[in-house]
Amino acid sequence: MNDSVRFRVTSGTRVKLSGIDPAFKGRHADHASAADELQHYTERLRALQELLYADGRHSLLICLQAMDTGGKDGVINHVLGAMNPQGCRVAHFRRPSPEEAAHDFLWRAHRDAPARGEVVIFNRSHYEDVLVVRVHKLVSRAVWTERYARINEFERALAADGVAILKFYLHISSAEQLARFKARLQDPSKHWKITTSDYAERNFWRQYRRAYEDALSRCSTEYAPWYAIPSNHKWFRNLAIARIVVERLEAMNLKYPAPAVDLAQIRRKYHTAARR
């Protein structure tokens, strides 16, 4: 079974994250044994992203969601960092700015959606508005419940306009999160990342898990699927995501456009003369 099938949330099914092993690592024993395959897929990803840019008919939106330390930045650095920045950018979804808060909750997502030929990665995403706002009761239940349908409509509209959408939930265990927090304490170069709110949010682990289960269950569609990626092993997380993105790009039947100039004329005028 390939990763795009194994980890995909089937539309209309109910997700139970307790039934997904966050330490799953497939057929590879460790990072070293997976290194060659990961290199292959990152190189293939680089070539396909260039083809997407040249083709100019489609675009790709990748949404990354996770608990704190789940690995969003790691995926961007180690997998999606293979892409050419000329046709790829990252949009961060932090606490809404005053301008963003003055609009509807999908405004900033639509503003940052990819143009044709472009890849955009949402580091967190419009799903924050059915996650953190729900857990911390920033809006009423009636408000966040209604947002699932609005999200599905928004993503359907993007897909109809040629945007391929892939959404990844990076699934780690509570114990793994605590271990990563501890590693930050031991690494001076990571001290700047530490906040007391990181630890405080652990008190809401179960609430976040339920919120994620609802988001994945209600908003995984044929046109914008969710993938629950086991992420305790960072190398496996990177490999699984690289394979899924490559497979999606290959399925788009991308082609280089025809040249806009007469190549034969250019060869005759410049290169034939140069050989004389």
Image (cartoon, rainbow, N blue to C red):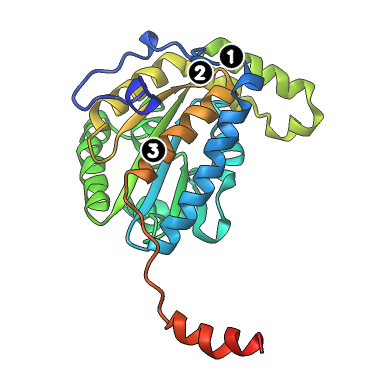
Does 263 appear above or below 120? below
The image shows residue 217 at horizontal and vertical percentages of 26, 24
Kind of element beneath mark 3: helix
| Callout 1–callout 3 Cβ contact below 8 Å | no
Q: Quadrant of the C terminus?
A: bottom right
Q: Nearer the viewer, residue 224 or 260?
A: 260
Q: Nearer the viewer, mark 2 or mark 3?
A: 3
Task: Name the disc covering residue 247, or none.
Answer: 3
- Whichever of labels 2 and 3 marks the residue nearer the N terminus, that label is 2
Question: Callout 1: few (<14), some (14-19), or many (20+) C-alpha neighbours within 10 Å?
Answer: some
Name the residue tied to disc 1.
Answer: 176
- Where on the picture, by quarter, is residue 167? top left
Counting the numbered discs, the total is 3
| Callout 2–callout 3 Cβ contact below 8 Å | no
- Residue at image position (24%, 18%) is 14
- Where on the picture, by quarter, is residue 218? top left
Does 250 appear above or below 141? below
Task: Name the disc covering residue 223, or none.
Answer: none
Q: Given the image, on which type of amino acid does mark 3 rest?
A: Glu
Name the residue tied to disc 2.
Answer: 172
